[in-house]
Image: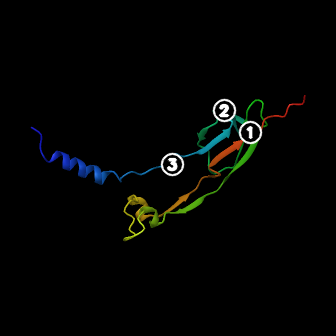
Amino acid sequence: MRSRLTPPLLALATFFLAGCVSFVTPAGTSISSTPPGARVVLDGRASGYLTPCRIALDTGDSHRLRLELPGYTPKEVMLVEGGDVYLIPWSAGYDMPYGWPFPLFLNSYDLFYPVRIDRGLSPDRVHLTLEPIASTR
């Protein structure tokens, strides 16, 4: 025989636990290209990756990133040590235009520590558009 308390307790637990999600961005630099499938060359050496990909690099050094694809002009970009400071405002935790502006939907870490310091490579997302090589006919 099932208990009558099971559905209300399950609904209550779902309500309170649904907001307990914390998203963590994976470490590394996102690299993509148009068209996709370009070979990623880091500091003059083949990395073994094709775009799109995410590569974890040493943040203490600068890196030269080169994308190569047969039939397209290669492109390069420098990744330098940098960092960003993000402030998570309380207004990100509520969406009602009226009432008390309390950050009900922020996770506990962002509620009590609203400043995030990101010490990574800049840019941390790279998208390059490769141009086709002009034919000389």
Which is nearer the N-term, disc 2 or disc 1?
A: 2
Q: Quadrant of residue 95?
A: bottom left
The mark nearer the N terminus, 1 or 3, is: 3
Q: Position of residue 124 (x, y in %)?
A: 62, 50
Who's the residue at 24% across and 52% down the image? 12
Label 3, on which residue? 25
Residue 80's spot in the image, x, y percent? 68, 52
Please tell me whether residue 58 is drawn above or below residue 46 in the rendered image. below
Q: Nearer the viewer, mark 1 or mark 3?
A: 1
Question: Label 2, on which residue?
Answer: 37
Secondary-structure class at tag 1: loop
Depth check: give the residue in front, 59 or 114. 114
Q: Which amino acid type corresponds to the residue marked 3 in the rendered image? A: Thr
Outermost residue toward the left in this view: 1
Q: Is residue 121 above or below residue 87?
A: above
What is the spatial separation of the Cα atoms under label 2 and label 1, in whole angstroms? 11 Å
Mark whose residue sits in front, 3 or 2:
2
Residue 121, given in percent of the width and then of the height, sits at 63, 51
Which residue in the protein does label 1 denote?
130
116 left or right of 103 in image: right
10 Å crowding of disc 3: few (<14), some (14-19), many (20+): few
